[in-house]
Image (tube, grey):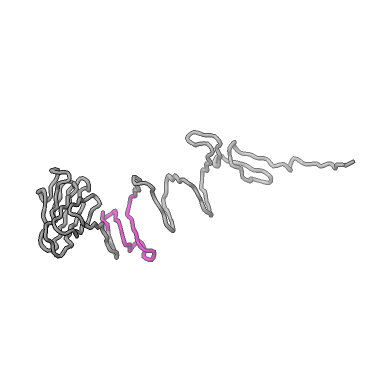
């Protein structure tokens, strides 16, 4: 027949938990835990908070990595980042900033950027770097420009018609450069203001002709019509 000894446990051997309902517990003393309204876990929806929401009022310091599928940041005063970053995932995303922007190599400081947008002087500055614009080769007899057009190199032989898009499409200030890349041409390059027909002009006319040996022309729009400069 087995025998059992007595065990006596004093009340001091039991820990107690304190704090409001839903508070995340932390060790507050010997065998005791407590909670705070500043660190709450809501299993049900509360006000604007969804169910299963952890709420911290105060400062969070993380020495490791934070992994999340979504970040909603209300106020940021400074961001320090290394490595590659990606912003946006659709064409209608807008990334708006106030102030100047500097882009450069890792060795120069922001005082010597390769590319700068200066909000004070309202200038875009290229320092120690080349400038590269959109280039399209015109290899067909009929070609229509778009808002993305900038430099057009005409390589098609014979007569070529380049139809300009309306300045309202590209916006005031859009610039076009058209260059005949052939050293000898038997026809004429006609620049036509006819898309849509009759709604705008080039140099107050419906078309403009390029002739001679390897001619070129610079155009800009005021938002409606096109002009040579």
Residue drawn at x 16%, y 63% is 182
- Tell me where residue 98 appears, x and y as whole percent: 33, 50
- Tell me where residue 108 appears, x and y as whole percent: 36, 65
User: Residue 157 vs residue 6: left or right?
Assistant: left
User: Residue 152 vs residue 54: left or right?
Assistant: left
Question: In this view of the protein, which residue sits in the foreground, 135 or 155?
Answer: 155
Residue drawn at x 44%, y 45% is 73
User: Residue 46 vs residue 28: left or right?
Assistant: left
Residue drawn at x 13%, y 64% is 184
- Tell me where residue 60 appears, x and y as whole percent: 52, 48
Q: Main secondary structure of the magenta part?
A: loop
- Tell me where residue 32 appears, x and y as whole percent: 67, 43
The question of residue 133 being in magenta is answered with no
Question: In this view of the protein, which residue sits in the foreground, 17 or 131?
Answer: 131
| Magenta part of the chain | 97-124
Residue 131 occupies quadrant:
bottom left
User: Residue 29 vs residue 63: left or right?
Assistant: right
Q: Quadrant of the N terminus?
A: top right
Residue 43 occupies quadrant:
top right
Question: In this view of the protein, which residue sits in the foreground, 88 or 29?
Answer: 88
Q: How many marks?
A: 0
Name the residue furthest right.
1
Residue drawn at x 10%, y 59% is 211
Q: In which quarter of the image is the C terminus?
A: bottom left
The question of residue 113 being in magenta is answered with yes
């Amino acid at each position: 027949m087995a025998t059992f000894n007595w065990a006596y446990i004093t009340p001091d051997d039991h820990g107690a938990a304190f704090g409001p309902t839903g508070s995340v517990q932390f060790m507050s003393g010997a065998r005791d835990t407590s909670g705070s309204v500043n660190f709450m876990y809501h299993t049900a929806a509360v006000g604007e908070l969804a169910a299963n929401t952890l709420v911290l009022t105060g400062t969070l310091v993380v020495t490791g990595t934070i992994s999340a599928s979504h970040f909603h940041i209300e106020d940021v005063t400074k961001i320090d980042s290394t490595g590659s970053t990606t912003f946006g995932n659709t064409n209608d995303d807008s990334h708006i900033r106030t102030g100047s922007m500097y882009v450069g190599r890792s060795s120069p400081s922001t005082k010597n950027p390769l590319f700068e947008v200066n909000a004070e002087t309202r200038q875009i500055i290229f320092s120690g770097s080349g400038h590269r614009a959109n280039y399209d080769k015109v290899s067909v007899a009929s070609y229509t420009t778009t808002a993305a057009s900038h430099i057009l190199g005409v390589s098609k032989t014979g007569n070529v018609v380049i139809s300009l898009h309306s300045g309202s499409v590209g916006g005031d200030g859009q610039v076009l450069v058209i260059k005949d890349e052939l050293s000898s041409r038997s026809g004429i390059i006609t620049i036509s203001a006819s898309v849509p027909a009759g709604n705008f002009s080039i140099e107050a006319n419906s078309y403009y002709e390029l002739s001679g040996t390897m001619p070129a022309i610079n155009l800009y729009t005021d938002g409606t019509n096109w002009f040579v400069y």
